[in-house]
């Protein structure tokens, strides 16, 4: 099954075409100016490079969050539009789940940490096989580290920012190298579920925000 996978929830955006267990092609871009500037053209370039038409894509996978509110919306709306036009099924994948899978087997406990700003992180705890041990949440980093002991493996864009706090709370912390571009991982995660018929309609995709957007009122003149 040819699956077009998209991730725009982190600054390192990517698009991949996954066919079975293989990644047929991938486009990666670090986009400080925003993913909306490149996503559609990137998808077009990838399909053209693989000599595929949009109708050759059999299903779509997309990260549903948590992550950048704007980036998340760009990815979801783009996939929804493409899948609706092509009448293809979709599947949403948690960004935290994809990060955990990127370091599966690298420690007995896996902890993705994504920068949620406001001095918070998006996080969840996983076992060595990247199966969730609890709910995902947005929380201060100190709370995210509570109760962790032993060789815990950390991954995500907040790890470097909070490395001192991690080292203090978890002296045996592990920092394995991980793939920062997630689209190919997302496609491979979605493939068996889509093959089992677990895909959903494009308008059924829902974002995983974990908290409300930070909307600030303009100062009074």
Image (cartoon, rainbow, N blue to C red):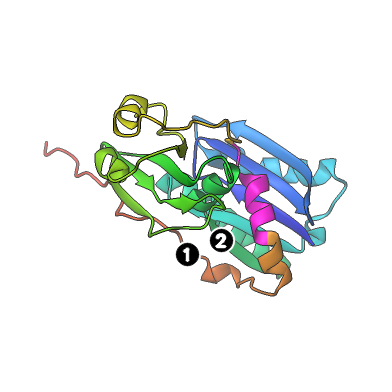
Relative image position of residue 78 (x, y in whole percent): 59, 54
* Residue drawn at point x = 42 percent, y = 32 percent: 173
Q: Is residue 61 above or below residue 123?
A: below
Relative image position of residue 160 (x, y in whole percent): 41, 26
Judge from the rendering whether residue 50 lies leftward or rightward of residue 69; answer left or right: right
Relative image position of residue 2 (x, y in whole percent): 78, 58
Relative image position of residue 127 (x, y in whole percent): 49, 52
Main secondary structure type of the part rendered in magenta: helix
* Residue drawn at point x = 70 percent, y = 46 percent: 16
| Residue behind mark 2 | 92
Q: Secondary structure at mark 1?
A: loop
Instruction: Name the residue at the front extreme.
Output: 150
Q: Is residue 199 above or below residue 148?
A: below
| Residue behind mark 1 | 206
* Residue drawn at point x = 61 percent, y = 36 percent: 179
Instruction: Name the residue at the right extreme.
Output: 51
Q: Of the residues tagged 2 and 1, which is closer to the observer?
A: 2
Q: Nearer the viewer, residue 143 or 5?
A: 143
Q: Secondary structure at mark 2?
A: strand
**Image quadrant assignment for residue 56:** bottom right
> How far apart, in angstroms, are the residues tagged by discs 2 and 1?
8 Å
* Residue drawn at point x = 78 percent, y = 53 percent: 21
> Can residue 84 be seen by looking at this rendering?
no
Judge from the rendering whether residue 55 lies leftward or rightward of residue 198; answer left or right: right
Range of residues picked out in magenta:
181-190
Q: Earlier in the sequence, mark 2 or mark 1?
A: 2
Say whether marks 2 and 1 touch (CB < 8 Å): yes
Q: Residues within 10 Å of mark 2 (few under 14, many from 20)?
A: many
Q: Nearer the viewer, residue 80 or 62?
A: 62
**Image quadrant assignment for residue 90:** bottom right
Judge from the rendering whether residue 37 lies leftward or rightward of residue 112; answer left or right: right
């Amino acid at each position: 099954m040819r699956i077009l996978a998209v991730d725009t929830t982190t600054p390192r955006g990517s698009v991949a075409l996954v066919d079975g267990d293989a990644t047929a092609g991938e486009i990666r871009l670090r986009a400080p100016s925003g993913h909306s500037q490149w996503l559609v053209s990137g998808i077009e370039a990838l399909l053209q490079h693989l000599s595929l038409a949009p109708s050759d894509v059999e299903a779509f996978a997309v990260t549903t969050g948590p992550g950048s509110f704007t980036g998340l919306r760009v990815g979801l709306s783009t996939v929804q539009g493409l899948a609706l036009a092509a009448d293809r099924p979709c599947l949403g994948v948690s960004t935290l789940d994809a990060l955990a899978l990127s370091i599966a087997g690298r420690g007995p406990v896996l902890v993705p940490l994504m920068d949620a700003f406001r001095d918070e992180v998006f996080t969840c705890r996983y076992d060595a096989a990247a199966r969730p041990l609890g709910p995902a949440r947005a929380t201060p980093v100190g709370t995210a580290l509570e109760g962790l002991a032993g060789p815990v493996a950390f991954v995500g864009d907040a790890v470097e920012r909070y490395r001192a706090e991690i080292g203090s709370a978890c002296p045996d912390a592990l920092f394995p190298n991980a793939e920062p571009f997630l689209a190919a991982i997302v496609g491979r995660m979605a493939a068996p579920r889509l093959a089992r018929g677990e895909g959903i309609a494009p308008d059924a995709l829902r974002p995983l925000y974990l908290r409300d957007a930070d909307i600030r009122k303009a100062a009074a003149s």
